[in-house]
């Protein structure tokens, strides 16, 4: 599903060139759950943004579901993105002015799904996430854990092939964090591909494979034993 | 989809109440101001357009110049021009002439002085198709001694009775039978009249020879051109006509004479000549106001653009999320446009309400008549539509582009890399607003300064406590002896300290105008304004002699003596006032001796330069025309006037008693300027309110944006005033730049405006500095309101924002 070759990302300011990613060769197969770890500033989020088609690499190739996308325009990327990728962020990134239902509905709106089908899909995913009683609440009326559940629901509603999670538990206490991780784990077991950035060694245990980044390089890749018995 | 856009737009507007309020309020004020100004401007431009064929009707006017190029320019024409044109030029469909006649009109016990009465040729009503409620407009006044009257006049004289067939008496000398009643003439007509009399009767009054007098003026002449006729080609033929008819005479007097065509529709806004029926409008004022309308709406739109781009930072996250969720740029643009549309629609609804609410007040201030509606005007709805569209696209486009262009990676990380974006545009727009506000304020200050300057000028005569009565027009054979007795009786009353008679009083252009006046021994004929006065006129008005003496009883020869003013001395070519004394003047064919020279006084508003006046003596008892002037010395105005009325009615029965106070009358001339001043002040005020609304919104976002900076500075020990200065500094810098731009522009405009006044106030530094101080103050106060909040806040609050 994902294959990068010698991926590079260089940030240029007026005087300094900073290399955020260097020679990244990473492959993620369909149905895989990969965790990316590393200290602050190692390039985890940059990598995730490129994988998520939010940004272009400076050099190298990136193959996503059969397309070489490294030179895609924002417009092309947006097209590919909305049909294939769901995002979960550390800070939830819900729109405060929209209700739970409307937040979840958003990707379907932009995919121009008809209203009847939209409603059905949203309610389905809300039921799964146990969000039905919160349907008409606004994000600010929810706890952090609940907000992140809404964010996950929104990431799932369009049934994307890939879910990218950027420190999804970073803003949550351990109870809520566990809940979200269980959710992701369940999705994975149902066949969804997940790439997750995390600081937490405990939560990285949920992944099949852990990729360690340091200064823009992949330093180690560990396979989680429990998936390879 | 639309439902979702609408929902999120509505919730957004509701959530950011201050922003929505400022925008809606600003746009409402801008659009209402714009509509009100356009209402006034369009009313001014609507003059005479209601006439069928208004594009083919022209007024023919007359100019006479001497060899020095000194010219008199009349709104009227000489009597024969229209007559000849009717005979000679096939491209002219109809010609009609009018002559104004102010007289005392009566029917039974109802007596009034009629100011708006004209002798009119029958074709007048074929050119101008006025609506008649009864009678035959075409043939009704073809016969002599016939009259058409307006509905209001009919009610005045014949309350309840059928006016047709009734008679009215003019000066108790000639009777006219009413043969038609026309609807009252609309306000937006340059020519307003209440009574039309048969043209044939004017020839009884002035003799048939007047029809051949190329030297007379006062015959208002209208031409209806055939539809294929070319007016400028026709105008080019007129010099040949003048030459053929009048060339010899002109050469003998060393004069030139021109006939000019004025398109009917242009008369109200561009015509300012001698003998106009009324003071016309002013195209420059109308254009100036249109410009202000554009400025104000532009300020409001600039506000919208400014606030929306500034606020886009607050919406960046939403844009990021929507993009990540799959929104394309087009979809985002549609969403934000919808918000712009909603705000503009809301503002438009408020604007329409404001127009409805304030229209009566605005009409009252500007004197626009009720008859000129606003809701039925095509321009009104076109403007509403245009403002909506322009508002949405002009002010909305940029913020929409900025918003929809945010990169999700950046905005979702909370890195406001884009914060700088639009900063320069915002600065330009703020400068633009400041320039407008400063310019409008400077202009307002100038207008008011000029008006008060004019009112406090020494006019060269005294106008306080002067009661002016129209001299009776209906006179018995004994009038000559009645007048002195009337005067004696008046002066017995200790509340009346003086009395005089004159053909004109200051406050309007001298009506009596005579050409062909020159010094003996020269052939330099010029036009002078003639004022007939008695022995006491100079004393009553407190006029000052610079040379010579007044008319006096002990000089019986004063019947052929003249007094000049200083300007007339110059025009006649005397070296000095003293040198003019004893010199002889040819006035038509008589010889007069100059006995005195009076200092120039301001006969009209200070817009006008001094004009050459010649004062002629009107012997008591002879044909005294014009006005009686009474100098009052009383606190009991009501009873004094009542006493004068009784006396007047006793001495001059059959004459209406009509009076006015000279100072009111004189100051009427400034009505237009005062109106201009008021309108200007009103809209400058609005412009400043809208601008400060913008600054309020903008500075609140800037404070928000710099929350962290403020927190850090406070941790490092900055005091609240320092922080206030930090935020105000940006605006004050922009204000300085704006002042530098506004200064030369407003200097140019106010100079241009002041040039229309013969006497004008100096341009002092204060005119520019007070507005600057005012705008600075408003800016600082506006910024203070939320800076204080930011400066007082606990620094921890602002730091943990990250």
Image (cartoon, rainbow, N blue to C red):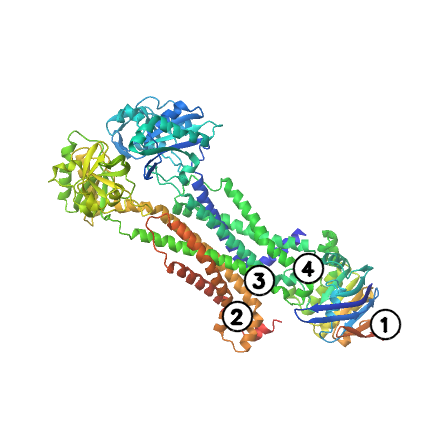
Mark 3 closeness class: few <14, some 14–19, many ≥20 residues within 10 Å:
some
Under circle 2, the secondary element is helix
| Res. B778 visible in picture | yes
Which residue sits furthest left?
Answer: B554
Mark 2 closeness class: few <14, some 14–19, many ≥20 residues within 10 Å:
many
Total numbered circles: 4
For marks 3 and 4, the one nearer the N-term is 4
Kindly identify which residue carries mark 1.
A227
Could you give the CA–CA distance between mark 2 and mark 1, rounded to whole angstroms? Answer: 55 Å
Kindly identify which residue carries mark 3.
B423
Q: Which mark is residue B322?
A: 4
Which chain is indicated by disc 2? Answer: B
The location of residue B552, given as percent across then percent down, is 13, 41
For marks 3 and 2, the one nearer the N-term is 3
Could you give the CA–CA distance between mark 4 and mark 1, rounded to whole angstroms? Answer: 36 Å
* Tags 3 and 2 on a common chain: yes
In the rendered view, would you say B566 is above or below B302?
Answer: above
Please give left or right for residue B366 compared with residue B304 in the image.
left
Which residue sits furthest front?
Answer: B521
Please give left or right for residue B116 compared with residue B650 in the image.
right
Kindly identify which residue carries mark 2.
B790
Under circle 4, the secondary element is helix
Which chain is indicated by disc 4? Answer: B
For marks 2 and 4, the one nearer the N-term is 4
Which chain is indicated by disc 1? Answer: A
Could you give the CA–CA distance between mark 2 and mark 4, rounded to whole angstroms? Answer: 31 Å
* Tags 4 and 1 on a common chain: no
Q: Quadrant of residue B118?
A: top left
Please give left or right for residue B754 compared with residue B556 in the image.
right
Labels 3 & 4 near each other (Cβ < 8 A): no
């Amino acid at each position: 599903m994902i294959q990068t070759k010698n991926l590079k990302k260089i940030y240029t300011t007026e005087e300094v060139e900073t290399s955020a990613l260097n020679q990244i060769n990473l492959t993620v197969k369909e149905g895989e759950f990969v965790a990316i770890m590393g200290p602050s500033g190692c390039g985890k989020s940059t990598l995730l943004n490129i994988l998520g088609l939010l940004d272009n690499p400076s050099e190298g190739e990136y193959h996503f579901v059969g397309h070489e996308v490294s030179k895609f325009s924002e417009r092309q990327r947006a097209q590919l993105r909305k049909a294939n990728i769901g995002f979960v962020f550390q800070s939830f990134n819900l729109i405060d002015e929209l209700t739970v239902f409307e937040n979840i509905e958003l990707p379907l709106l932009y995919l121009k799904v008809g209203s009847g089908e939209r409603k059905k899909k949203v309610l389905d995913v809300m039921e799964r996430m146990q969000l039905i009683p919160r349907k008409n609440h606004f994000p600010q009326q929810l706890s952090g854990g609940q907000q992140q559940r809404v964010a996950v629901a929104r990431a799932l509603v369009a049934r994307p092939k890939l879910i990218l999670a950027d420190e999804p538990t970073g803003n949550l206490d351990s109870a809520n964090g566990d809940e979200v991780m269980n959710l992701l784990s369940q999705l994975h077991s149902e066949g969804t591909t997940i790439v997750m950035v995390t600081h937490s060694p405990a939560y990285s245990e949920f992944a099949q494979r852990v990729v360690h980044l340091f200064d823009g390089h992949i330093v180690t890749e560990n396979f989680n034993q429990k998936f390879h018995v | 989809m639309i439902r979702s856009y609408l929902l999120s737009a509505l919730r957004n507007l509701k959530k950011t109440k201050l922003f929505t309020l400022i925008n809606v309020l600003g746009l409402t004020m801008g659009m209402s101001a714009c509509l009100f100004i356009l209402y006034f401007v369009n009313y001014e431009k609507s003059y005479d357009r209601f006439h069928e064929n208004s594009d083919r009707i022209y007024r023919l006017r007359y100019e006479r110049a001497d060899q020095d190029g000194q010219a008199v320019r009349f709104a009227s024409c000489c009597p024969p021009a229209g007559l000849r044109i009717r005979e000679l030029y096939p491209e002219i469909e109809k010609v009609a002439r009018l002559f104004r006649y102010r007289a005392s009109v009566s029917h039974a016990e109802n007596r009034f002085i009629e100011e708006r009465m004209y002798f009119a040729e029958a074709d007048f009503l074929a050119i101008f198709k006025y609506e008649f409620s009864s009678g035959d407009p075409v043939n009704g006044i073809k016969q002599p001694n016939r009259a058409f009257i307006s509905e209001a006049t009919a009610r005045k004289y014949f309350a309840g009775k059928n006016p047709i067939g009734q008679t009215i008496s003019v000066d108790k000398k000639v009777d006219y039978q009413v043969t038609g009643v026309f609807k009252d003439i609309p306000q937006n007509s340059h020519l307003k009249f209440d009574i039309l009399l048969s043209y044939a009767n004017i020839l009884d009054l002035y003799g048939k020879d007047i029809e051949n007098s190329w030297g007379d003026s006062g015959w208002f002449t209208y031409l209806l051109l055939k539809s294929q006729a070319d007016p400028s080609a026709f105008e080019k033929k007129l010099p040949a006509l003048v030459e053929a008819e009048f060339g010899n005479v002109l050469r003998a007097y060393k004069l030139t004479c021109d006939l000019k065509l004025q398109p009917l529709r242009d008369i109200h806004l561009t015509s300012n000549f001698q003998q106009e029926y009324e003071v016309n409008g002013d195209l420059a004022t109308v254009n100036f106001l249109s410009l202000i309308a554009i400025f104000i709406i532009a300020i409001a739109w600039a506000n919208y653009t400014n606030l929306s781009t500034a606020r886009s930072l607050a919406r960046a996250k939403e844009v990021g999320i929507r993009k990540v969720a799959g929104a394309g740029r087009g979809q985002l643009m549609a969403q934000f446009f919808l918000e712009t549309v909603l705000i503009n629609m809301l503002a438009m609804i408020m604007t329409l309400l404001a127009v409805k609410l304030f229209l009566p007040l605005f009409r009252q201030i500007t004197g626009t008549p009720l008859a000129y509606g606003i809701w039925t005007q095509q321009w009104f709805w076109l403007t509403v539509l245009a403002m909506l569209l322009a508002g949405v696209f002009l002010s909305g486009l940029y913020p929409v582009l900025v918003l929809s262009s945010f990169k999700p990676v950046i905005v979702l990380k909370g890195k406001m890399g884009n914060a700088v974006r639009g900063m320069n545009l915002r600065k330009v727009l703020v400068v633009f607003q400041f320039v407008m506000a400063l310019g409008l304020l400077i202009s307002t200050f100038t207008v008011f300064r000029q008006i008060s300057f004019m009112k406090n000028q020494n006019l060269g005569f005294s106008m306080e406590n002067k009661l002016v009565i129209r001299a009776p027009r209906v006179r018995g054979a004994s009038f000559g002896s009645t007048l002195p007795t009337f005067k004696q009786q008046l002066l017995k009353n200790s509340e009346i300290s003086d009395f005089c008679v004159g053909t004109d009083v200051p406050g309007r252009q001298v009506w009596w105008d005579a050409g062909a006046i020159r010094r003996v021994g020269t052939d330099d004929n010029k036009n002078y304004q003639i004022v007939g006065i008695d022995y006491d006129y100079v004393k009553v008005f407190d006029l000052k002699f610079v040379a010579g003496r007044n008319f006096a009883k002990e000089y019986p020869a004063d019947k052929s003596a003249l007094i000049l003013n200083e300007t007339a001395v110059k025009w006649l070519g005397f070296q000095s006032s003293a040198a003019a004394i004893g010199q002889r003047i040819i006035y038509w064919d008589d010889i007069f001796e100059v006995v005195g020279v009076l200092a120039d006084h301001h006969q009209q508003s200070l817009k006008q330069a001094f004009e050459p006046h010649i004062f002629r003596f009107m012997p008591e008892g002879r044909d005294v025309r014009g006005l009686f002037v009474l100098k009052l010395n009383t606190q009991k105005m009501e009873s004094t006037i009542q006493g004068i009325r009784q006396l007047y009615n006793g001495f001059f029965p059959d004459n209406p008693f009509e009076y006015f106070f000279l100072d009111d009358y004189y100051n009427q001339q400034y009505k237009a300027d005062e109106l201009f001043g008021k309108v200007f002040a009103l809209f400058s005020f609005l412009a400043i309110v809208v601008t400060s609304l913008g600054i309020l919104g903008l500075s609140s976002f800037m404070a928000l944006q710099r929350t962290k900076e403020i927190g850090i500075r406070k941790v490092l020990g900055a005091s609240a005033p320092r922080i206030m200065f930090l935020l105000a500094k940006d605006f004050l810098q922009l204000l300085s730049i704006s002042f530098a731009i506004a200064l030369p522009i407003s200097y140019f405009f106010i100079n241009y405006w002041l040039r229309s006044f013969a006497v004008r106030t100096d341009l002092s530094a204060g005119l520019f500095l007070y507005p600057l101080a005012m705008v600075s103050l408003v800016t600082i106060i506006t910024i203070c309101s939320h800076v204080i909040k930011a400066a007082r806040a606990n620094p921890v609050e602002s730091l943990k924002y990250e």
